Amino acid sequence: MKRIILSTESGADLPIDLVEKHQIQVVPMHVIMDGKDYLDGELSVEEVFDFYDRMKTIPSTAATNVHEYEELFTNIRLKFPESIIIHIGYTSKASASFQSAVIAAEGFDDLFLIDALNVTGGLGAVVMYAAQLLEEEPEISHEHLIEKIESIVPKTRLAFLPGSLDFLKAGGRVSNIAYIGGALLKIKPCIELKEGKLVSTRKYRGKMEVVAEKLMKDYLNEYNIDRKQLYLIYSIGLDEKIKKRLEEIANETGFKNVRWMQAGAMISTHAGPGGFGIAGIEAYKIQ
């Protein structure tokens, strides 16, 4: 029986211990700063934030290209001969990365692509669902595994609060008028993934310790998230007291496993410091 290997992009923000445990193959996306193209992971998040402090603009980000996917898939085959590759990709609605994977995959057999229609912890949740299923059912066929992954993609929910509007403004994602109004009123937009697209769904007013808790409670009220696993995402700068309180809420609401994921340089370029996100998969019936 051929071994199934999972791959994804750095934009999944998977913790290194989980990547190593499940031998998930991760291809980097790109952060472009000071005219230099860095692979996501080469730059620290602190360097991205320092760049903004100096320049009052943010680095740009770019998708993984076709050649990099060809290298990824080739290297997987060299490391794991006779393997079946299942690539779970960053949403095609917000990046050209998935289309590059589609083009690169044309030269490979036993390679299957799944558009997760999600980013950061949402993408990570889909990848980890697949990894845990493989761990629990090592004899599962790739056809059945793909079917199960595709069934939970539309049930994967991600909501995120940027730490401030500064990075969104610098990236051109909010207008000057909206920025000024939001800053004066201490408004934080909630960003969610809807059918693979990043959408501002609601607005919260107040300090992060108040609005993060409000977001988490609203999220858990709106979505029937499977209590087996919850992912909490943060960008550097989120207060440890806030993190502790959010973890308490997760435990109080019955989650068996809670995992924190740090937003990497690519995601933090847009989220800024002190951001908070939450991701999980809605309860489903196992077939």
Image (tube, rainbow, N blue to C red):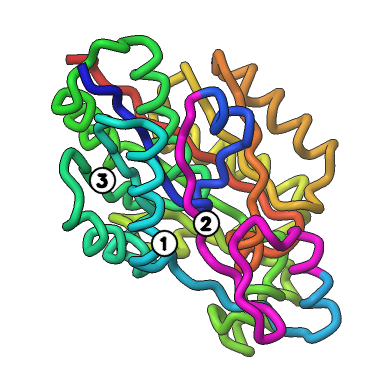
Give the residue at mark 3. Answer: 114
Mark number for residue 25? Answer: none
Residue 28 image label: 2
Quarter of the rendering containing residue 77? top left
- For the record, the magenta segment spans 22-49
Label 3's element?
strand
Whether residue 232 sits left or right of residue 223 in the image: it is right
Frontmost of labels 2 and 1 is 1
Residue that appears at 60% across and 76% down: 37
Indicate the quadrant where residue 16 lies: top right
Identify the residue position indicated by label 1 in the image.
68
Measure how far apart labels 2 and 1 are at the Cα level: 9 Å
> The residue under label 2 is which amino acid type?
Pro
**Which quarter shows the N terminus?**
top left
Q: List x then y, in percent, for residue 101.
A: 29, 58
Q: Earlier in the sequence, mark 3 or mark 1?
A: 1
Q: Amino acid at mark 3?
A: Ile
**Quick check: 97 left or right of 236?**
left
